[in-house]
Image: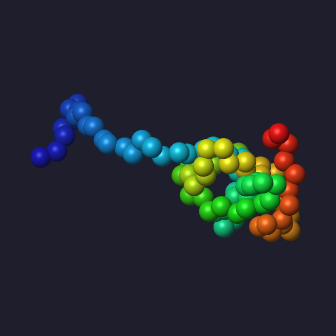
Amino acid sequence: DGLLEGEYITAQFELESNIEAYEINREAVMSDETVFIAVNDTLMKVKVNIIQELDDTMIITGLTNGDVVVSESLVNVEEGQAVFTNTK
């Protein structure tokens, strides 16, 4: 009814393969599990899902490929505020 010592099994799992997960700096994730992204030189707050927490980074979902994440700590900022990016 169960495995005995020395026995093994082979298992197959179906995983969702279209998940877009990103590894970002831990400082970019706010305490409410959001990040700021820059859209047309304006700050926008996006809710993310934390998949795994590592030493200095986090694996998250909820972003779109091409999103410009603000990776530095921000103090007293609000969504809609103007921001300068050096991505150009």
In the rendered image, the vertical position of residue 36 relative to residue 23, given as above or below: below
Q: Do we see residue 45 in this rendering?
A: yes
Depth check, front residue: 72 or 9:
72
Q: Which quadrant holds residue 32?
A: bottom right
Depth check, front residue: 18 or 15:
18
Residue sticking out furthest to the left: 1
Q: Residue at x 48, y 46 (%)?
A: 19
Residue 48: x %, y % from top left: 60, 58
Q: Residue at x 61, y 44 (%)?
A: 65
Q: Which quadrant holds residue 35?
A: bottom right
Q: Residue at x 19, y 40 (%)?
A: 3
Question: Is 34 on the left or on the right of 20, as rendered?
Answer: right
Q: Quadrant of the C terminus?
A: top right
Q: Which quadrant holds residue 74?
A: bottom right
In the rendered image, the vertical position of residue 48 relative to residue 52, given as above or below: below
Q: Residue at x 77, y 49 (%)?
A: 71
Q: How many marks?
A: 0
Residue sticking out furthest to the front: 40
Q: Do we see residue 54 in this rendering?
A: no
Snapshot colouring: rainbow
Residue 69: x %, y % from top left: 73, 50
Depth check, front residue: 72 or 40:
40
Residue 23: x %, y % from top left: 63, 43
Question: Is 68 on the left or on the right of 12, as rendered?
Answer: right
Residue 75: x %, y % from top left: 86, 64
